[in-house]
Image (cartoon, helix red, strand yellow):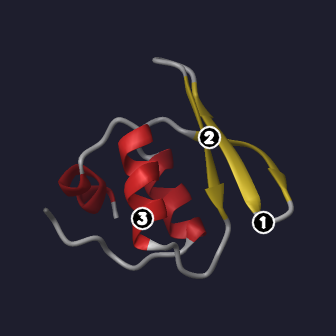
Amino acid sequence: MSHLPRISGQECLKALQKVGFALDRQRGSHMSIVREDPFKALTIPNHRELDAGMLRAIIRAAGLTVEEFRDLL
């Protein structure tokens, strides 16, 4: 199992934007992002540091591996 980086919600958003996700809306501290092709919608908490389990779930839901995600940072 690969080591997860300690990043913020904003850093996670910037990395996912590189693979086609775009900020759709934000309500409070949660950002909703979408990708059109293939369609996928995710929610990212806009926190200073994402919990390791939450980050792993976001990466998995985006259809990426941890290594692919780390290359996007």
Within 10 Å of the Cα at label 2, are there few (<14), some (14-19), or many (20+) other Cα atoms?
some
Instruction: Tell whether label 1 touches label 2 (CB within 8 Å).
Output: no
Real-space Cα separation, disc 3 to disc 1, in angstroms: 18 Å
User: Would you say 7 lies left or right of 10 here?
Assistant: left
Residue plotted at (48% across, 18% down):
37
Q: Earlier in the sequence, mark 2 or mark 3?
A: 2
Rendered position, 32 above or below 3: above
Q: Nearer the viewer, residue 14 or 41?
A: 41
Image depth: mark 3 or mark 1 in front: 3
Image depth: mark 2 or mark 3 in front: 3
Helix, strand or loop status at disc 1: loop
Under mark 2, the amino acid is: Ala
Helix, strand or loop status at disc 2: strand
Real-space Cα separation, disc 2 to disc 3, in angstroms: 23 Å
Within 10 Å of the Cα at label 1, are there few (<14), some (14-19), or many (20+) other Cα atoms?
few
Label placed on residue 29: 1
Q: Nearer the viewer, residue 14 or 60?
A: 60
Rendered position, 15 above or below 61: below
User: Would you say 27 lies left or right of 5 here?
Assistant: right
Residue with the most extreme front position: 53
Q: Earlier in the sequence, mark 3 or mark 1?
A: 1
Residue plotted at (18% across, 56% down):
67
Under mark 1, the amino acid is: Ser
Residue plotted at (58% across, 67% down):
9
Q: Which residue is mark 2?
A: 22
Under mark 3, the amino acid is: Gly
Image coordinates of residue 22 in percent, x first then y, are: 62, 40
Quadrant holding the C terminus: bottom left
Image coordinates of residue 35 in percent, x first then y, are: 55, 29
Image coordinates of residue 7 in percent, x first then y, are: 45, 76
Real-space Cα separation, disc 2 to disc 1, in angstroms: 17 Å
